[in-house]
Amino acid sequence: MSKAMTVIVADDHAIVREGLKMLLSTMADVSVVAEAADGEAVLALARSEPAGLLILDLGMPGVAGIQFIADIREIAPRMKILVLTANVEPRTVRAAIEAGANGYLTKNGDPAELADAVDALRANDIYLAQSIRFAVSDPARQTLPSATDEALSPIPLTRREMQILSLAAQGLTARESAERLGISPLTARKHRENLMRKLSLHSAAEIAAYAVRIGLPIG
Amino acid sequence: MSKAMTVIVADDHAIVREGLKMLLSTMADVSVVAEAADGEAVLALARSEPAGLLILDLGMPGVAGIQFIADIREIAPRMKILVLTANVEPRTVRAAIEAGANGYLTKNGDPAELADAVDALRANDIYLAQSIRFAVSDPARQTLPSATDEALSPIPLTRREMQILSLAAQGLTARESAERLGISPLTARKHRENLMRKLSLHSAAEIAAYAVRIGLPIG
DNA sequence: GTCGAAATACGGCACCTGCCGTATGTCGCG
DNA sequence: CGCGACATACGGCAGGTGCCGTATTTCGAC
């Protein structure tokens, strides 16, 4: 018998934390030892009393996306990280795993998967929700035909594109973004077009919605 | 002894529904009889088998804001409606109650409030989360100084404006919104302008960001 | 029955956008 | 030393946007 796995529950919604604790309490050998409502609290817990498992909502305030996973992984290398979020973007799933997450569940998924995921992580496996399992491919596998390629690609944005994305998401026009960055409006517009093409976005509204969805800070 | 209160749980996140069911299962005389993941399912349930209480996430797809509450109230006048959402905008709280909700909880609030709220609603009371209780003022109370005025102001959107807001937030143009609603593009544009003025928004991107912030469904 | 709010509808104007090109300089990697 | 990725910069074009008007109809409140 393995001894009980200690768990930290991190979600900004208290009622969701409470629900998760209830769900976890029905599982054998699982013990919720702490909870956190924001990114800072998660980091503090990872430092002071790392648990066996962290269940992490990527949509929390103070959790600046994927980088946050890498930060935790650095602080507490032995703690398992199970991402639990509403974000179903394939590239986010891929990036989360690459950043060091051990599992990825979506809030829309079958609740029964929570138990499966905890078991898998305890066995040092990686667990992905059924609905997004297609999103992470084996890097060794040779390139596939076509349709899936786009979904599988990490689609990395350049530094400038990231800046423009952040500004555009706050409602700034190309001109205003250009002023902030000290470049030509036309250049800013080009960066904007490039990132939109990369991300398959087609309007300012979609940029804002996307930015919010992936957890970018929005004014 | 009152007999068990039947409850419908409506939230688009399966894992949140599951957690809520677990939490409710610890309460005496409460029985979850159905759940719904989108607005249509809620309306169908309200028609076919209304329960004593509906716990409703206002951020669900197909739940076009406050009007949805009024719709349910019309279909099932005797069913209690407890709003449970991430939206803490005072005007939304106010509007929800005016539209016929019997209670309003925030996902950030103390989970213990869930039990209090259910009890209050069962006793035909209205229950508001501690954190937003200030938001609904007694209409009889005379106007307060100033600073709070703006926050307290309902800034009510009309039904059409609410619909346009929801569509615009999903990235639809005025023309596309007009097609969905079967009205002139120019009329749709006017509704859009009106709601933007009311809400002090100045671009499509701001509409999208605002809609996300208040918990409206975003494509 | 009157009054106001809401919904309907139209038009002009400056600006921005999204998409299509092209082109140049820099910098790092093999 | 190239080659490719990145950043820089410019322009045309069609369409959408945000802001400014005006006007009619419908409908509930008083």
Image (cartoon, coloured by chain):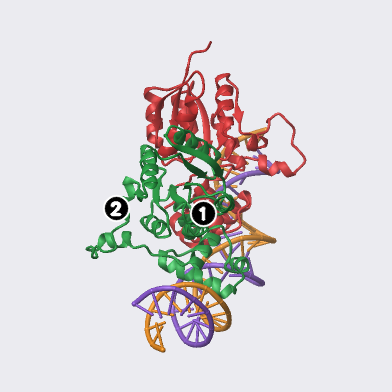
Chain colours: A red, B green, C orange, D purple
Dot 1 falls on which chain?
Answer: A
Dot 2 falls on which chain?
Answer: B
The label number, if any, that marks residue B151 in the structure image: none
User: Residue B197 sits in which quadrant?
Assistant: bottom left
The label number, if any, that marks residue A208 in the structure image: 1
Do callouts 2 and 1 mark residues in contact (Cβ within 8 Å)?
no
**Quick one: C28 or B161, which is closer to the camera?**
B161
Q: With respect to residue B72, does B51 lie above or below?
A: above
The label number, if any, that marks residue B134 in the structure image: 2
Q: Give percent across and percent down for residue B185.
A: 59, 73
- The crowd level at tag 2 (other Cα within 10 Å; few <14, some 14-19, many 20+) is few
Q: Give percent across and percent down for residue B90.
A: 36, 55
Q: Give percent across and percent down for residue B65.
A: 48, 57
**Quick one: B95 or A176, which is closer to the camera?**
B95
Q: Identify residue type, mark 1.
A: Ala
Left or right, D15 with reference to A27: right
Q: With respect to residue B208, does A63 lie above or below?
A: above
Dot 2: what SS?
Answer: helix
Dot 1: what SS?
Answer: helix
**Residue placed at 47% from the left, 16% from the top?**
A4
Q: With respect to residue A14, does B206 lie above or below?
A: below
- The crowd level at tag 1 (other Cα within 10 Å; few <14, some 14-19, many 20+) is many
User: Residue B27 sits in which quadrant?
Assistant: top left
**Quick one: B13 or A55, which is closer to the camera?**
B13
Residue A84 can be seen in this image: yes
Q: Identify residue type, mark 2.
A: Phe
